[in-house]
Image (tube, helix red, strand yellow):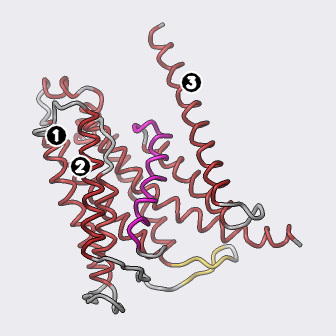
Amino acid sequence: MLAEVNAHILKPALVNGVAISSLYGVLAIALVLTFRMSRTVAFVHGGIASFAGYLYWWMAAASSSQFHVLGWPKIPSLLLAVLFGAVAGMAFGSVVMGRMATWPRVVVTTFSLGGMLMAAGVAGTIWRGVFERVPSPFGEGRRQIFGTGVTNHQLVTVALLVVLVSTLTAVLQRTRLGIQIRAIADDVEGAAMVGIPVRRVATAVWTVGGALAGLAGALVVPMTSLTELAVLFVLMRSLAAAVLGGFDSLPLALAGAVLFGLVESLAGGGVFGTVSSGAREVLLMALLFAGIVLMGRRRGRVLNLLEA
C-alpha cells in the first residue's frame, strides 16, 4: 500500500518540484548576472524580492482582514512589482559600480546583505503581521497534464523561466551587448581600456537583475503564505543553486535550481515516506557540498590543461 501511495504522490510532487525550481531559477539567474559584473553576492535581490512580494499583494489583493488593499488588476500589479525591482536594482547597481567600484568585494557584499535586511525589514514594518493568501496573477485555473492537476500559476512560472533563460542566453552569446557583458565579467580593467562603457553596461545588468528579483518575489507569494521569511527562504535556495553554477554559468545555476526543487518536493511530499525537515535539509546540503567538490575538480582540471 505504501508503494502505491508513493507512486500516486510522485507525479504531483514532480510537478510541484519543477514549479518551485522555476522560482529558485529566476533568483539564481539574477544572482549570477550581477555577480559577473561586480564579483559580489547580491544578497540585496532577496530584499527586493521580499518587498516586491508584499507590494504585489497590496496592489492585487481584493480584500484583507487587517489592511487596506488596492484591488488592482493582477497583471498590471505584477508589472509594477517588476518595475519596482528594476528601479531598485538600477539604484543599487549604480552605487556598487560607481562609488563602491574599487572597494573591497567583501565590504560590498556586506553592504548588499545590509540592503537585503533593510528592505525586508521595511516591508515587514509597513505590513506588520501580514499572513495572507495572495492571488495568482494568472488566475486560479487548473489543467490536467499527464493525469496530474497543474495550476495556471505553475505552468506560466515554468514557461517564464524557459523564455528568460533562452532570451538571456541568446543576448549573451549573439549580441554586442552580450560580448560587452562577457568582456566585463572576464576583465573589468581590460574592458574599460578597449572602450566598453563598463559602468553603464553593469548598471543595466543590475537593473535586469533587480527586475528578475521583483518578478520572483511576486511569483513566490501566491505559492506560499505571505510572511517576512517566505521570499528570503527562496533566496537561500537560489543562492545554493548559483553556488553550484560557480556564480558564472546560467545553465548550471538552472540545473542546481531544478535539483534543489525536485529533491525538496519529492522528499517533503512523502514520495519516499516520512522525511523530517531536518533530514531534508541535510540531504540538500549534502548535494550542495558534493556539487561544489565536483565543480572544483572540474575547474581544476581545466586550469591544469590551460597551464600545460
Query: Is residue 236 in the magenta section?
Result: yes
Give SS at disc 2.
helix
The mark that comes first in sequence, 3 or 2, is 2
Q: Amino acid at mark 2?
A: Trp
* Residue 297, label in figure: 3
Q: Residues within 10 Å of mark 1 (few under 14, many from 20)?
A: many
* Residue 97 position within the rendered picture, expressed as x and y whole percent measured from the top left: 16, 40
Q: In what element is the residue under mark 1?
A: loop
**In the foreground, 48 or 257:** 48
State the residue in front, 183 or 289: 289
Query: Measured along the vertical axis of the image, is residue 14 above or below residue 292?
Result: below
- Asked whether residue 137 is in view, the answer is no
Identify the residue shown where x is 59% and y is 51%.
259
**Amino acid type of the residue tagged 3 in the rendering:** Arg
Q: Which mark is residue 97?
A: 1
Q: Does residue 293 lie above or below 218 as drawn?
A: above
Instruction: Please report the bounds of the magenta region as a residue range.
Output: 227-248
Quadrant in which residue 164 is drawn? bottom left
**Residue 226: which quarter of the image?**
bottom left
Q: Is residue 308 left or right of residue 2?
A: left
Tell me the chief SS of the magenta region: helix
State if disc 3 and disc 1 touch (CB < 8 Å): no
What whole-number distance in Å separates the C-alpha atoms at marks 3 and 2? 30 Å
Image spot of residue 75 (x, y percent)? 31, 79
Q: Is residue 42 part of the magenta span, yes or no?
A: no
- Per the image, label 3 sits on a secondary structure element best described as helix
Pointer 2 residue: 206
